[in-house]
Image (cartoon, helix red, strand yellow):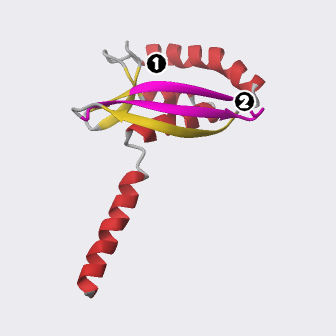
């Protein structure tokens, strides 16, 4: 009986660890929002999937564009106070998903979005479509 309890306990801990992983469709969206919240726009670019590899200069340009576009908007709304994942629609092949989520802002407002994510070489990334 003790062995069964130990095995079940280990399985439960493993499941809890996997469900909290950032390497999941919802995890990459949570990481994206966290990067925006912390003004880490370069890290946002790193969790995005582009069809072609970007040079360091291109990554810096994308990060600057995000900073210029989103920074002032986030500042007006009092920053990001949290995110709620509302739905994950996994594709049949398990290689892509649509994640529905709501970003909550410091001023009390909210914005709902749906982002497509893809699994590339075992890592979940936001699909830029580019």
Q: Nearer the viewer, residue 95 or 31?
A: 95
Q: Quadrant of the C terminus?
A: top left
Q: CA distance from mark 1 to mark 2?
A: 30 Å
Of labels 1 and 2, earlier in sequence is: 1
List the residue tagged with mark 1: 59
- Left or right of residue 115, residue 40 in this image: right
Q: Residues within 10 Å of mark 2 (few under 14, many from 20)?
A: few
What residue lies at 30% left-to-right and 67% top-to-bottom? 11
Any magenta on residue 101? yes
Name the outermost residue toward the bottom: 1
Where does the magenta region start and end? 94-116
Residue 15 x/y as whole percent? 34, 59
What residue lies at 48% left-to-right and 34% top-to-bottom? 29
List the residue tagged with mark 2: 109
Q: Residue 91, located in which quarter of the rendered image? A: top left
Q: Residue 28, located in which quarter of the rendered image? A: top left
């Amino acid at each position: 009986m003790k062995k069964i309890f130990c095995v079940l306990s280990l399985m439960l801990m493993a499941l809890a660890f996997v469900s909290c992983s950032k390497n999941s469709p919802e995890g990459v969206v949570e990481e994206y929002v966290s990067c925006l919240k912390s003004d880490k726009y370069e890290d946002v670019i790193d969790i995005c999937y582009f069809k072609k590899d970007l040079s360091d200069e291109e990554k810096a340009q994308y990060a600057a564009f995000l900073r210029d576009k989103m920074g002032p908007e986030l500042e007006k709304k009092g920053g990001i106070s949290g995110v709620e994942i509302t739905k994950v629609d996994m594709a049949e092949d398990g290689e892509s998903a649509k994640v529905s989520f709501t970003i909550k802002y410091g001023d009390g407002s909210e914005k709902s979005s749906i982002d497509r994510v893809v699994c590339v070489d075992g890592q979940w990334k936001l699909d830029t479509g580019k």
